[in-house]
């Protein structure tokens, strides 16, 4: 394998945007047709929505198809989303599944064809981040039901990189350090909690990620492989497409899938989506931004999507900010109002009206910069706002009071 080339799969990675879109349309038609004719779950879903595969004539027609919600997909457990069951001709050979912490697992079935495609997608990403044949990779992702371990492993194998499958053994630091030195490890795959990551990458187990998106050397978003996935970015409340580059929820369709049908799967991840003709790295695939939060936590104010994590990011810059804040959204004379109560760290500031007003003004400005919406900020004493417990502490239910809802 030539290690001095720029891309792992040059032709597809640099294919013109219009040709990529033609390929997407061809694959979208094919997967919708297969799902409808081979899978009773999809047939029922599309019949209920009154839509037939023939309705897909251009890419935008994907909007005619109903979304898949995680709970619907979970109810289809175990084989509801499968296109090729194990044991059938060319059937599934490997299954992965989400953790199921909030209910049943969502399984994903991979055939040999899927695994080969998966290997290539991961090899593209490893190549993109600087790996070359002959390198030695230490893979610290778990080799289990989540997809991280196997995905990068197959990718490395496809491009002649030896992998040390550390997986969960990565916790044995002495042995790990010994291997790094003794085997001459030249690169790593690990989660950001284990180490500083050089390149950002995003994938979902439901669509056999990793191998869905990866950051290139321009470090301006992550390329989402358009030959394998069609990404949409929607307003989580209306379900409609947002303008290119605007914040919204990512919705994924797995175009190259063979064993599992995932068509318009709502990720609940908030991010951005844009598609340049060609990136500075030479690749032509669309890009998504870093995942900013969960759409369950988002609230639409004056037509713009706002989520508590954005507000939090804007507030933490102030040394005066305390432990908690609360967004209060209401409607007056047909217009949305946006009030923001912020607990202060030291209540002494509340006695200094001039300073308190200045800080509140600066906070409002800072929130406006990140959300596009200017709130009316009120500073309140520490521990005066209602507090959520456990896992709810960062969700909208704890931080947003939407009085527009009856
Ligand atoms: Zn690029």
Image (cartoon, helix red, strand yellow):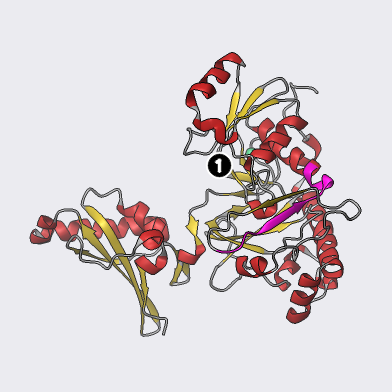
Q: Residue at x 21, y 56 (%)?
A: 359
Left or right of 207, for residue 318? left
Left or right of 8, for residue 402? left
Q: Position of residue 273 (x, y in %)?
A: 60, 54
Answer whether residue 142 is visible to the viewer in this image: yes
Left or right of 92, for residue 218? left
Q: Position of residue 386 (x, y in %)?
A: 27, 68
Task: Classify mark 1: residues with Cα within 10 Å, few (<14), some (14-19) or many (20+).
Answer: some
Q: Position of residue 56 (x, y in %)?
A: 81, 68
Outermost residue, right side: 89
Q: Is mark 1 within 8 Å of ligand 1?
A: yes
Outermost residue, left side: 351
Q: Position of residue 203 (x, y in %)?
A: 62, 48
Q: Quadrant of residue 65?
A: bottom right
Please tell me whether residue 187 belongs to the stretch shown in magenta.
Answer: no
Q: How many marks?
A: 1
Q: Which quadrant would the N terminus be assigned to in this image?
A: top right
Which residues make up the magenta segment? 103-115
Q: Which quadrant would the C terminus be assigned to in this image?
A: bottom left
Q: Which residue is mark 1?
A: 220
Q: Residue at x 81, y 73 (%)?
A: 55
The foreground one among 282 and 53 is 53
Q: Residue at x 83, y 46 (%)?
A: 113
Q: Quadrant of residue 267?
A: bottom right
Answer whether residue 14 is visible to the viewer in this image: no
Where 338 sits versus 392, above or below? below
Where 340 sits versus 20, above or below? below
The foreground one among 252 and 204 is 204
Where 3 sits versus 272, above or below? above
Q: Secondary structure at mark 1?
A: loop
Please tell me whether residue 110 belongs to the stretch shown in magenta.
Answer: yes
Quadrant position of ligand 1: top right
């Amino acid at each position: 394998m030539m290690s001095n080339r720029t891309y792992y799969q040059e032709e597809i990675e640099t294919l013109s945007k219009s040709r990529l879109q033609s390929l997407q349309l061809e694959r979208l038609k094919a997967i919708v047709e297969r799902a409808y004719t081979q899978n009773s779950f999809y047939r029922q879903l599309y019949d209920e929505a009154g839509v037939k595969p023939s309705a897909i004539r251009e890419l935008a027609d994907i909007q005619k198809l109903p979304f898949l919600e995680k709970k619907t997909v979970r109810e289809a457990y175990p084989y509801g989303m499968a296109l090729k069951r194990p044991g059938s001709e060319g059937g599934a050979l490997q299954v992965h599944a989400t953790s199921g912490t909030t209910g049943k697992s969502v399984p994903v079935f991979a055939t040999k064809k899927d695994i080969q495609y998966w290997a290539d997608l991961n090899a593209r990403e490893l190549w993109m981040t600087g790996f070359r044949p002959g390198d030695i990779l230490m893979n610290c992702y778990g080799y289990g039901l989540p997809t991280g371990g196997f995905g990068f492993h197959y990718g490395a194998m496809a491009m002649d990189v030896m992998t040390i499958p550390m997986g969960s053994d990565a916790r044995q630091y002495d042995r790990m350090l010994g291997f790094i030195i003794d085997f001459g490890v030249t690169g790593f795959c690990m989660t950001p909690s284990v180490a500083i990551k050089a390149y950002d990458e995003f994938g979902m187990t439901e669509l056999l990620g990793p191998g869905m998106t990866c950051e290139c050397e321009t470090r301006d978003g992550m390329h989402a492989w358009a030959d394998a996935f069609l990404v949409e970015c929607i307003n989580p409340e209306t379900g409609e497409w947002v303008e290119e580059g605007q914040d919204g929820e990512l919705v994924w369709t797995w175009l190259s899938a063979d064993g599992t049908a995932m068509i318009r799967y709502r990720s609940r991840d908030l991010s951005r989506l844009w598609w340049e003709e060609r990136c500075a790295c030479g690749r032509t695939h669309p890009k998504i931004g870093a995942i900013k939060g969960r759409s369950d936590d988002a609230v639409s104010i004056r037509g713009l999507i706002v989520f508590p994590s954005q507000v939090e990011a804007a507030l933490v810059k102030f040394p005066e900010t305390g432990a908690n804040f609360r967004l209060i959204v209401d409607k007056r004379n047909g217009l949305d109002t946006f009030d923001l109560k912020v607990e202060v760290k030291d209540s002494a500031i509340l006695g200094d009206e001039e300073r308190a007003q200045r800080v509140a003004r600066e906070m409002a400005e800072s929130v406006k910069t990140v959300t596009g919406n200017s709130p009316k900020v009120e500073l309140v004493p520490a521990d005066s706002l209602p507090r959520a417990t456990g896992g709810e502490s960062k969700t909208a239910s704890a931080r947003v009071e939407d009085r527009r809802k009856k």
